Image (tube, helix red, strand yellow):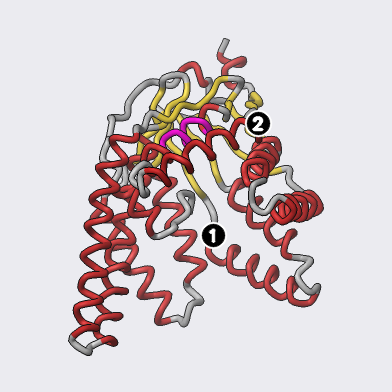
Amino acid sequence: MEETTNRPQKYHLSYTGKGSDFFSVIMVNWLFTLLTLGFYYPWAKAKQLNYLYGETHLNGDPFTFHGTGKEMFKGFIKALLIFGTLYGMLYLLMYLEEPFVGLIVFYLGILAILPIAIHGSYRYRMSRTSWRGIRFGYRGERKEFTLNFFKWILLTLVTFGIYSSWMTINMRRYLIGNIRFGDAECSYNGEGTDYLILNIKGYFLTIFTLGIYMFWWQKDLFEYYISNLSLHKDEKELQLTSTATGSDFFTLGITNLLILIFTLGLGYAWVVTRTLKYIFDHIEIEGTIDLDSLKQTEENFKDATGEDVSDFLDLDFII
């Protein structure tokens, strides 16, 4: 029995959504958001995430997003107040003929709320996500992450941007390393040096090939991100790997661009669907963790302020 448990198994990720169904969700959301002068947006986002999560499967079972429009609306109002205050200070200082001071105060304010928004977004999104009834969770500490964030920003500034690769990897390590899937722990093992070399190579080859290598660069970044992700429980683990290719990224990117151009943007739902299907079809998971053995350990967290502030700042959820 022990040999069977420790024998590596393969797990399957898939996305089963249809472009036409997602298009219906987007159009209804767009209509109600327009009719309510934007106030329907939190409910629109909740419905969109409910659809996308519900169509994403692990071993045939869907993920579930439990967030609600009501939760997000409360966070939406708080985010409006935060940004309203910042913009109010900016216009007041401009009115007092201190535009330079106003811009400094505004951007320092944005910088100050960035780590809080990222931390809050992870805590909310993870808590409201489950699979087979087992919740995800995020155990990072806001104070610890904020102090680290500003340390990484300072090091990036004094190195004229060179440290940005280490900052990206450090953020991933902290954020992903604090994600829990029931009683299993996520881990990220990337290195700043590898990431820097990867980006230098991609940058120069993209220039030399007049932009063509950009898709292979994107493939390399995706592969590096995925291949350094793992899940651990006791002495067992699941390891993720990517089977994506540069030529596939090229075909996917060009086709998606043509769809958007020739549909005047209306094909966005099909672009998202095609992209998600490709991504999940090209992630392989292998390991010795029995998913049926996962236990519920994570608490509910319903404050969506960080999620909504992240939206205002147009931050990607996955760093």
> Which of the two discs, 1 and 2, sits closer to the camera?
2
Q: Nearer the viewer, residue 203 or 189?
A: 203
Residue 38, how many percent across, how many down? 37, 48
Which stretch appears magenta?
46-52
Mark sitting earlier along the chain (1/2): 2
Percent from the top left, x then y, of residue 251? 80, 51
Question: Horizontally, is 180 left or right of 217 in the view?
Answer: left
Q: Is residue 146 left or right of residue 220?
A: left
Q: Is residue 102 left or right of residue 135?
A: left
Q: Which residue is tagged 2?
A: 18
Query: Which amino acid does the dot numbered 2 rest on?
Result: Lys
Quadrant in the picture for residue 191: bottom right
The residue most toward the front is: 35
Q: At which x and y percent is residue 294?
A: 44, 21
- Classified by dominant secondary structure, the portion drawn in magenta counts as helix
Kindly identify the residue that appears in the image at 64 percent across and 52 percent down.
265
Per the rendering, the mark at residue 191 is 1
Q: Please report the residue visible at 48 percent of the width from the left and 34 percent of the height from the top.
A: 232
Q: Is residue 269 magenta?
A: no
Q: Secondary structure at mark 2?
A: loop
Residue depicted at 67% across the width and 37% down the height: 277
Badge 2: residue crowd in 10 Å (few <14, some 14–19, many ≥20): some
Can you say which quadrant of the picture contains the N terminus? top right
Determine if residue 241 is in view. Answer: no
